């Protein structure tokens, strides 16, 4: 393994630089996944922000508190979550289908890099949420026998790719767990 | 000995029912459940309808018994050619098939009342998770006669071993099969707890839980006492009345000392009693498929841990026990050991010389003196040290609010700091052959023996704090254990972490030719 210059630095783009050999370079997810994340976050935080604004304009105003503050905070927070976060989070995802294992890396502040050897996969699913379906994406769910990481999810894959990966992994499963 | 009962159902002579004594056990188990009825009784009492309480209780009992009888009536099981079949359920029928090659082993458990009646509960260990909700009774035969249970276990073992077992494998009287089957005493004994060792273990399990129970009871029921428990003046007046107040004052240090002695006595006694109840006559024997452990005073359990399913072993100790050389050995596997502990404790209290043969039986060994250990980097102590700030913060807040008692929170700080600093010095790991060894902990030092074949997945995690130092952690996904304590290597430089992880995973993959 080649030593990287600094494990604490990070390359802009995919995932923090590691001591990867070139064939272990991580691939990014499909670009539309950032839109999927954005829409999901909007669907989550939109109603919350609206509810907070309504609460602020009605209850807080009648109670005589500092009305308007909560609305501003809620709207700013929702905008932050919907506009800025998804692309940053998308940039921190990466995966690699190696010959005998699957590697998934995500996150920056709390960076997690998971490796699952194919021979120890219990079973494998391909799932597709409604928002993902609109963009033609799927996610791969790998089940292992360990208590920690009993399911490992890889989102943001093109549906054809996900099915192909599932079939590749399935062929290599040699679990002898009853 | 109870009459063996196989109530054959017509037209399918192989089906068997549970022992009718089960109903008696269910009646006894109704006791705690009767608490559900207390609000109803209270309502009846408050509204003044006293006369209805007894009939209401009677109806409740009858109803519960009726349900239990129906449930017993609708439960049947049999040994088919390839599998064990259970049919159960009142309204939602449940037909369970347990193929013999999926049954790892059969465990037998006897509560105190069950032992009086000669009954036992039989549970099939398939490596699957235990039933999550209380309504789901899982795949257990609760209860059948003890000798039937043992012959059932031998029959299943024989089937798994592929021997030609008699087709009437669960004979109606059970005696013939038991005589032919190898008795538990024939299996070689790996470890047993002598009463003296049990006593010592009880001393180490010092527990002030009795005080907590007393405090809880005092809080709940102090309204029912004729006097006020918290009235200090009342206690003082009582002492004056008895004439002991002067004596107590002049000998107040004696009183404090006596209190401490009583507390210690209660603590030790509680520990001994609890340990005796759980670990009485602890025996660990070697069976062809695994390690069999029997223990218990009131509830006798009989569990086999299959050798193949052991994913990791942990040699643990305590900060005082270690000085005396006492360790315990636990095994992790997919099956969990009852509801309270996930790991099977196979040696609860032994020296390292007693632990080594058990490990050898599992084809594991503690690392030798020449193992190449890597130590954790000191920076890993930082998160734990930051944790020590929490009690300090609490104490400061309490002081600001005018509660000097908050200073007591500072008592928590030295143990946290010591634990963090010394613990990180003790944290080290080594890879010898096909096993990864991890040592960590100060207050509860433990050595984890993790065969690389057990590693299902491996994470390298870099948190915001450790990133400054270029440090990472590796977490291993291993079958068994609790979700909160995945096996972990901390304080390892990030490039080393990636390299180590890839080496371990490659070794695991190579072992399978994958």
Image (cartoon, helix red, strand yellow):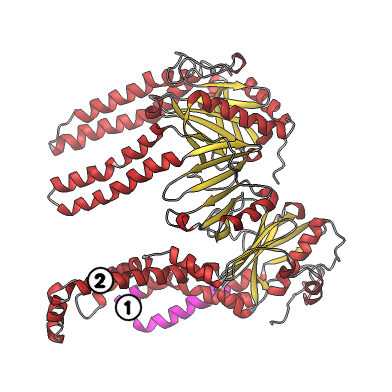
> As rendered, which of B2 and B106 lies closer to the eye?
B106
Asked whether the residues under marks 2 and 1 belong to the same chain, the reply is yes
Residue denoted by label 1: B45
* Mark before the other along the chain sequence, 2 or 1: 1
Chain under label 1? B
Residue B19 in which image quadrant: bottom right
Mark 1 residue element: helix
Chain under label 2? B
Left or right: B255 as drawn, with respect to A139 = left
Residue B280: x, y in percent? 55, 70
- Count neighbours of disc 1 (C-alpha within 10 A) and say few if under 14, some if 14 to 19, many if 20 or more: some
Residue B300: x, y in percent? 59, 70
Quick check: is B39 in the magenta stretch?
no
Q: Main secondary structure of the magenta part?
A: helix
Residue B69: x, y in percent? 61, 74
Q: Residue at x 58, y 47 (%)?
A: B480
- Count neighbours of disc 2 (C-alpha within 10 A) and say few if under 14, some if 14 to 19, many if 20 or more: few
Q: Quadrant of the C terminus of chain B?
A: top right
**Range covered by the magenta-colored residues:** B42-66
Left or right: A170 as drawn, with respect to A149 = right
Residue denoted by label 2: B257
Quick check: is B52 in the magenta stretch?
yes
Task: Determine if residue B398 is in view.
Answer: yes
Q: Residue at x 81, y 56 (%)?
A: B161
Residue B175 in which image quadrant: bottom right
């Amino acid at each position: 393994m080649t030593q990287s210059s600094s494990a604490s630095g990070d390359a802009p783009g995919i995932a923090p630089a590691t001591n990867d050999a070139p064939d272990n370079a991580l691939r990014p997810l499909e670009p539309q996944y950032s839109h999927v994340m954005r829409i999901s976050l909007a669907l989550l935080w939109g109603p919350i922000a609206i509810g907070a604004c309504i609460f602020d304009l009605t209850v807080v105003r009648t109670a005589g508190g500092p009305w308007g503050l909560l609305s501003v905070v809620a709207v700013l927070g929702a905008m932050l979550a919907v506009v800025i976060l998804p692309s940053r989070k998308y940039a921190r995802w990466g995966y690699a289908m190696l010959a005998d294992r699957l590697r998934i890396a995500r996150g920056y502040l709390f960076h997690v890099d998971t490796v699952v050897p194919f021979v120890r996969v219990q079973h494998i699913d391909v799932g597709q949420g409604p928002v993902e379906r609109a963009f033609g994406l799927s996610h791969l769910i790998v089940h292992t026998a360990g208590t920690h990481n009993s399911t490992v999810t890889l989102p943001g894959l093109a549906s054809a790719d996900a099915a192909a990966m599932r079939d590749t992994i399935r062929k290599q499963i040699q679990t002898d767990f009853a | 000995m109870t009459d063996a009962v196989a109530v054959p159902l017509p037209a399918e002579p192989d089906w068997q029912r549970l022992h009718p004594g089960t109903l008696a056990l269910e009646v006894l188990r109704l006791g705690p459940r009767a608490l559900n009825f207390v609000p109803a009784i209270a309502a009846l009492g408050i509204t003044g309808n006293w006369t209805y309480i007894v009939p209401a209780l009677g109806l409740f009992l009858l109803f519960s018994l009726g349900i239990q009888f129906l449930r017993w009536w609708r439960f049947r099981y049999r040994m088919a050619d390839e599998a064990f079949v259970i049919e159960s359920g009142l309204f939602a029928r449940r037909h369970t098939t347990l193929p013999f090659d999926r049954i790892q082993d059969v465990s037998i458990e006897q509560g105190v009342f069950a032992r009086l009646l000669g009954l036992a509960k039989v549970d099939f260990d398939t490596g699957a998770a235990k039933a999550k909700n209380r309504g789901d009774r899982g795949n257990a035969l609760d209860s059948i006669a003890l000798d039937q249970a043992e012959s059932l276990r031998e029959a299943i073992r024989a089937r798994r071993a592929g021997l030609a077992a008699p087709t009437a494998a669960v004979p109606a009287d059970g005696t013939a099969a038991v005589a032919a089957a190898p008795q538990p005493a024939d299996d070689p004994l790996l470890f047993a707890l002598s009463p003296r060792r049990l006593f010592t273990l009880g001393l180490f399990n010092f527990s002030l839980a009795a005080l907590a129970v007393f405090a809880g009871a005092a809080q709940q029921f102090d309204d029912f006492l004729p006097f006020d428990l918290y009235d200090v003046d009342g206690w003082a007046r009582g002492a004056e009345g008895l004439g002991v107040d002067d004596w107590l004052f002049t000998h107040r240090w004696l009183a404090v000392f006596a209190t401490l002695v009583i507390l210690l006595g209660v603590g030790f006694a509680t520990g001994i009693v609890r340990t005796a109840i759980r670990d009485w006559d602890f025996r660990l024997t070697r069976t062809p498929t695994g390690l069999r452990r029997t223990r218990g005073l009131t509830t006798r359990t009989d569990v086999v841990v299959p050798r193949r399913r052991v994913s990791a072993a942990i040699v643990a100790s305590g900060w005082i026990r270690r000085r005396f050389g006492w360790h315990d050995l636990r095994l992790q596997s997919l099956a969990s050991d009852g509801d309270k502990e996930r790991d099977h404790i196979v040696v609860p209290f032994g020296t390292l010389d007693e632990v080594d043969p058990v490990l050898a039986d599992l084809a594991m060994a503690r690392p030798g003196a020449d193992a190449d250990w890597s130590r954790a980097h000191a920076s890993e102590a930082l998160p734990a040290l930051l944790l020590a700030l929490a009690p300090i913060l609490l104490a400061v807040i309490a002081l600001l609010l005018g509660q000097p008692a908050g200073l007591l929170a500072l008592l928590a700080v030295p143990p946290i700091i010591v634990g963090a600093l010394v613990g990180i010095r003790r944290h080290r790991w080594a890879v010898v052959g096909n096993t990864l060894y991890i040592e960590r902990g100060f207050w509860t030092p433990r050595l984890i023996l993790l065969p690389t074949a057990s590693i299902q997945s491996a994470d390298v995690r870099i948190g915001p704090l450790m990133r400054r130092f270029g440090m990472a952690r590796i977490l291993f996904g291993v079958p068994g254990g609790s979700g909160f304590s995945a096996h972990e290597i901390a304080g390892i430089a990030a490039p080393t972490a990636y390299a180590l992880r890839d080496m371990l995973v490659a070794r695991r993959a190579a072992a399978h030719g994958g």
